[in-house]
Image (cartoon, helix red, strand yellow):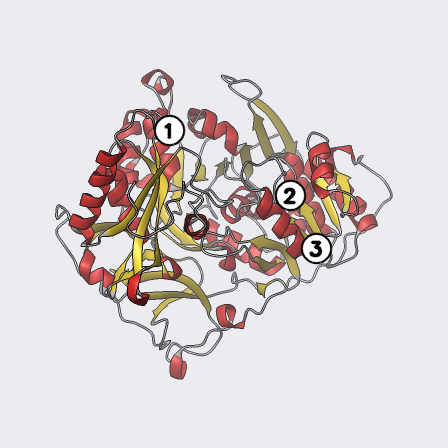
């Protein structure tokens, strides 16, 4: 029997205990479904685990992993997206091991990052599947960690009592995406992930009403892991998974899964919503009903109101309610969720004066002013405390003042694995101005307006030219709107050393896939980008480099890596353009 309404969840201290609870109380309910798309136009092949079946697989994998590694040792997950990934993650936790959610070596453009993370985490054992075993074995080489093939581990085996788990012990290492620096592994405890799962459920109103999680975000990413695994396990709800590549090949597949299940909640970055608008055809919309969607989470930094407007305009005739878009904010150091707008509420919109924002003040501007910055509010904290601080003086700032976002709560991680973490995880306000206790310094800039957290950018990404601050994502937005041949969300703005010890600004942008570089009027594109950035920001770009699609590096979570783009630029990787004032 598979009732649509899950029972109320108990307060278990760890995820494995939730799995055992649901296996005992609702054994035949569906727990996880993976939808595979074996052919280009496949509507999907569904493979489902009930809670009883999930518990059997978790127990079997926990017993097998316990034969290979001792409590506290690391287990790297190099599995494709699917139910085996879920069972291996929960099995590692159940065995008292520390999971390291990663990906197979075949993920394009991420082999170097994978090698670096494995060298840092030093796992004793790697879990993969029979489909990926050969490439994992070849990637690890001789003398590497031992390999366990998840789908070849049989059910049953010797009876094994569950390992008593300390809720404060590390459950897994969540490696940061590396958008501004080298990836670091955040130690997430069992208590951290359970707290954050329950915070997310409460924030979106999913703790007391039915829900189905539908997700294509990779499970090695913090948002994908918590929304598609931890929250459904804590709630006893169905989680429907698909491969990220299946979404990228045909985005309507995601929308069809949203339509096929009641009370759905899902998450995606800005580009995914715009991608659906651009690629889902009128024929594909026929018969598509989205009135059962509860919440669509957008955790991009910052969230642009235009993205939500375009998506809802495109799918309003399919019954998509306007209050489903939920701008949210989070980061790996806080497990993931920090603040969220609630479903059913209108989008909080703020038009801010660009010059004042660069000077650290969030002052209102007319929305139709071309120099206005349009942002959305990311709601209120989800079961935690959030303050905005001056990053230098550590003094709390008043509403409307821009500073660094600081977070305090039971979801904040223990620190970075094998690194000094005190500066990030042990911050204190000057003179105890915000009360006692340690705070997490997020490195993100923001302010509070009308009670809402508004994220404005990354502290380390700021472009400072002639004493003025410029937000790179703001410069990128102007650049991609300047010419139709600039590929949306595939460009990076950053600062490089300039003359007299100062800095100057550079943009590296991919051209659209529909444009061919040999036929493109590059000079006209560059003039348009320079003109738009100059007019809107008062910023002279020292260089604009146009590169083929797929050239601008991305993080493991799909964001553009400004840090790596900058490094490659300075190395001369973009056609020898690494010089200030270069002509394109």
Point 63% across, 64% down: residue: 418
Q: Examine the rendered structure and indicate whether residue 330 appears above or below residue 429.
A: above
Report helix, strand or loop for mark 2.
helix
Residue position marked by numbered label 1 in the rendering: 290
Q: Are marks 3 and 1 in contact (CB under 8 Å)?
A: no
**Of residues 11 and 450, which is closer to you in this image?**
450
Give the numbered dot on residue 122.
3
How far, Cα to Cα, is label 2 from label 3?
33 Å
Q: Determine which quarter of the picture holds residue 529.
A: top left
Q: Where on the picture, by quarter, is residue 225?
A: top right
Mark-to-mark CA distance, 3 and 1: 45 Å
Q: Distance between the residues labelled 2 and 1?
A: 29 Å
Which residue is pictured at 74% across the width and 38% down the height? 137
Closest to the observer: 503 or 72?
A: 503
Q: Quadrant of the N terminus?
A: top right
Answer left or right for 309 relative to 557. Answer: left
- Label located before the other in sequence (2 or 1): 2
Q: Is mark 1 on a helix, strand or loop?
A: loop
Q: Is residue 112 left or right of residue 554?
A: right
Residue 22: give its label: 2
| Residue 470 rendering spot, x and y as whole percentages | 27, 57
Q: Nearer the viewer, residue 192 or 472?
A: 472
Mark 2 vs mark 3: in front? 3
């Amino acid at each position: 029997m598979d009732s649509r309404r899950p029972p109320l969840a108990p307060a278990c201290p760890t995820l494995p205990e939730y799995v055992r609870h649901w296996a005992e109380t609702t054994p035949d309910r569906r727990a996880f479904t993976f939808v595979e798309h074996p052919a280009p136009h496949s509507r999907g092949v569904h493979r489902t685990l009930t809670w009883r079946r999930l518990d059997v697989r978790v127990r079997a994998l926990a017993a097998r992993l316990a034969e290979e590694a001792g409590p506290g040792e690391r287990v790297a997950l190099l599995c494709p997206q699917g139910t085996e990934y879920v069972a291996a993650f929960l099995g590692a936790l159940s065995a008292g091991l520390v999971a390291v959610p990663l990906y197979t070596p075949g993920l394009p453009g991420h082999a170097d990052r994978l090698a670096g993370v494995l060298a840092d985490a030093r796992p004793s054992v790697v879990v993969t599947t029979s489909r990926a075993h050969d490439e994992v074995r070849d990637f690890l080489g001789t003398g590497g960690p031992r390999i366990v093939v998840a789908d070849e581990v049989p059910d049953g085996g010797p009876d094994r009592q569950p390992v008593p788990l300390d809720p404060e012990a590390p459950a897994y290492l969540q490696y940061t995406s590396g958008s501004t620096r080298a990836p670091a592994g955040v130690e997430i405890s069992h208590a951290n992930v359970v707290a954050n799962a329950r915070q997310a459920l409460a924030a979106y109103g999913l703790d007391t009403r039915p829900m189905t999680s539908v997700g294509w975000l990779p499970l090695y990413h913090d948002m994908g892991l918590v929304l598609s695994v931890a929250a459904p396990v804590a709630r006893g709800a169905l989680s429907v998974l698909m491969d990220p590549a299946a979404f990228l090949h045909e985005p309507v597949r995601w929308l069809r899964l949203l339509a096929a299940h009641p009370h759905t909640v899902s998450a995606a970055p800005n580009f995914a919503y715009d991608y659906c608008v651009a690629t889902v055809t009128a024929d594909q919309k026929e018969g598509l009903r989205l009135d059962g969607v509860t919440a669509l989470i957008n955790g991009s930094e910052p969230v642009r109101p235009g993205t939500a407007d375009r998506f809802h305009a495109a799918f309003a005739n399919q019954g998509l309610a306007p209050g489903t878009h939920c701008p949210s904010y989070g980061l790996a150091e806080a497990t993931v969720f920090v603040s969220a707008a609630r479903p059913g509420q209108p989008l909080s919109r703020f038009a801010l004066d660009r010059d004042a924002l660069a000077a650290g003040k969030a002052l209102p501007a007319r929305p139709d002013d071309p120099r206005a910055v349009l942002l959305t509010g990311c709601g209120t904290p989800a079961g935690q405390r959030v303050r905005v601080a001056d990053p230098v003086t550590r003094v709390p700032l008043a509403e409307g003042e821009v500073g660094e976002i600081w977070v305090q709560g039971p979801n904040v991680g223990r620190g970075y694995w094998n690194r000094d973490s005190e500066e990030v995880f042990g911050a204190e306000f000057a003179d105890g101005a915000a009360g006692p206790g340690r705070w997490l310094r997020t490195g993100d800039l923001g302010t509070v307006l009308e009670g809402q957290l508004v994220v404005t950018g990354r502290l380390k990404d700021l472009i400072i030219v002639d004493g003025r601050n410029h937000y790179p994502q703001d410069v990128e937005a102007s650049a991609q709107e300047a010419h139709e041949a600039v590929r949306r969300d595939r460009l990076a703005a950053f600062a490089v050393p300039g003359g007299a010890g100062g800095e100057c600004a550079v943009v590296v942008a991919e051209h659209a896939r529909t444009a061919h570089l040999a036929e493109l009027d590059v000079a006209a594109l560059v003039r348009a980008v320079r003109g738009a950035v100059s007019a809107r920001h008062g910023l002279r770009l020292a260089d604009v480099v146009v590169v083929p699609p797929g050239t601008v590096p991305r993080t493991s979570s799909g964001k553009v890596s400004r840090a790596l783009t900058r490094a490659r630029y300075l190395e001369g990787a973009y056609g020898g353009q690494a010089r200030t004032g270069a002509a394109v």
